[in-house]
Amino acid sequence: MRKVLSLAAFAAALTPALGAVFGYNSGAQKPGGVKNQADYENEFRAAKALEGAPAGGFVSVRLFTMLQDENAGNNPIEAIPAAIATNMRLLLGLWASAGSAKFDRELEALVTAVNRYGDAFIRLVDGISIGSEDLYRNSASVEEGSNPGANPQVIIGYIQKVRQRLSNTKLKAPIGHVDTWTAWVNGSNAAVVTACDWIGMDAYPYWQSTATPNNAIEQSPRLFQDALDRTRAASQGKPVWITETGHPVSGRTWGQSVASVENAKRYWNEVGCPRFGKEPIWWYKFQGDQVGDQPNFGITPPGQLTTKPLFDISCKPAGSSSPEPSPLSTGHPAAGGPPVSSSLSTSSGARNSPRSDVSTSASSTITDSVTLLNGTVSATSSSSPPVTNTNGAGLTAGSIGGALVGMLAAIVAV
Ligand SMILES: *[C@@H]1O[C@H](CO)[C@@H](O)[C@H](O)[C@H]1NC(C)=O
Ligand SMILES: *[C@@H]1O[C@H](CO)[C@@H](O)[C@H](O)[C@H]1NC(C)=O
């Protein structure tokens, strides 16, 4: 007798595998404003020309909003014409934590882009994310009121609305949601998984200050792999895309994880290299932000755009010209994402900021990260500062994850 596929499994079976994608996260802001088409074009060209890049270099950019101006109008983000001009693929994002009226504007901007740019745009779209770390920000792990998120029913409603609205357009890209690994392993969010074609996981061992035994850099491959394994276990057979991960090149020490160029290189080699060119992954991030004391995750420095990374990104062993054997020792990097910065969440900052690191810390606010395009610092929202609860003492999503891991370990031990 033939088994009847569950609807979810059937939907998953209909979603073509994306294959490997080597991409990065890009916020919409720059110092003093938002990036315009020229800013995006310059950034995309630099990202594609990055010296020593593995897997043929970056081919896709993840965005956090469809709106060029979150405060007015429904004009599509100018990253779209820039992507068309530079042949950069896109993982689109609709900001979903600012209420239904704003979400409707996000959707109108997407439809406007489809109508305005047609196939030149449609062919570049790897996927569409309805929201970013909204469940994480909505969870008990994030300080109340610090950074509004959205609950599972709201996200599901938005997903259905987008599916319906796009059904009579030519844009057929797979629709999913991006959240921290801690949100995906939370059974209360299972219905969101069911509603998605794919799920995007943000994971940052750096933010997992409560991990057992600790979150020092040497634990990163294991913590990341654990987050990925657990997210896959909760994925209902849907593809899991790694939508955010990385390690800061500078900034404060979080738990026992030290932000340094040396550790960022080690994380790249041990967590990134084994996966680049093999599965969908959007690194956090290409160019560093420099806002306050937030950790800087850029593999290139803030300021003038450069094609020279801060460390050797070739994935080759030092002093060798042959491909590096996968150093995935124990595990892969784990999950924690940068915490959502507590300040920006809601409106402007949040939506553009790529604070997908929610996985780890609960409260990271989406602070705008500053990306310097021409020597000017642009605040890209991509880097999210750790979710510090109010005074920096708060729970990080990572801590929550660590606590869960600890509980699991205890159960296993019993
Ligand atoms: C689990 O998810 C639900 C629904 O999103 C949320 O209300 C709850 O706070 C989450 N639990 C934790 C521990 O984050
Ligand atoms: C970069 O330079 C261009 C041209 O001078 C300018 O239009 C743009 O605003 C600059 N970007 C930043 C971030 O300063």
Image (cartoon, grey):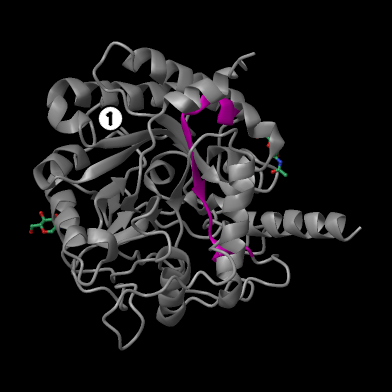
| Residue at point 57%, 56% (across, down) | 335
| Residue at point 55%, 50% (across, down) | 358
Q: Quadrant of the N terminus?
A: top right
Q: Amino acid at mark 1?
A: Ala
Q: Residue furthest left?
A: 85
Residue 383 pos. (x, y %): 41, 57
Location of residue 7 with respect to 398 vertically, above or below: above
Q: Which residues are magenta?
A: 192-208
Residue 194 falls within the magenta-colored stretch: yes
Mark 1: few/some/many CA within 10 Å (<14, 14-19, 20+): few
* Quadrant observed for ligand 1 in the rendered image: top right
Numbered disc 1: secondary structure: loop
| Residue at point 74%, 53% (across, down) | 404
- Residue bearing the label numbered 1: 72
Residue 181 pos. (x, y %): 59, 48
Location of residue 181 with respect to 204 vertically, above or below: above
